[in-house]
Image: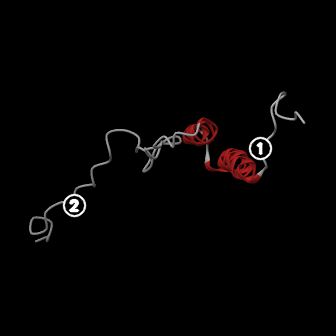
Amino acid sequence: MTDEAADPPVEAAAEPAGPAEPAGPAGPVALGVVRTPTGHAGVDAHLARLADADHLAADGHVEVYEDVHQGLREALTALDAPPVPGPYENRS
């Protein structure tokens, strides 16, 4: 007498039907940060440039951020500069 009838046969585990999909997104994904206009055309242009980083890999963000930072610093520095006189304001 054998014990083959007492133990049911062990079935092999089912294999996935297709290749496994990657866990994360395939490329850069925009963060969807809302950029509210400031009313200052120069500042708004620099802030709009931040949208360029949405389509770049993380290592490309540095160039965009440095460019925007430099532009915003220049806009702030310009606020401290004395006004440039017009062509007819130097009359004596």
Q: Nearer the viewer, residue 8 or 37?
A: 37
CA distance separating discs 1 and 2: 88 Å
Residue 11 falls in which quadrant of the image?
Answer: bottom left
Identified by mark 2, the residue type is Val
Identify the residue at the far top of this view.
87
Residue 45 falls in which quadrant of the image?
Answer: top right
As drawn, the label of residue 10 is: 2
User: Residue at left 46%, top 47%?
Assistant: 31
**Quarter the C terminus occupies:** top right
Disc 1 versus disc 2: nearer the observer: 1
Residue 72 at what x, y percent from top left?
68, 49
User: Residue at left 47%, top 43%?
Assistant: 35
Residue that numbered label 1 is attached to: 83
Position of 37 with respect to 10 (left or right) is right
User: Residue at left 31%, top 40%?
Assistant: 17
Q: Does 90 sit above or below residue 57?
A: above
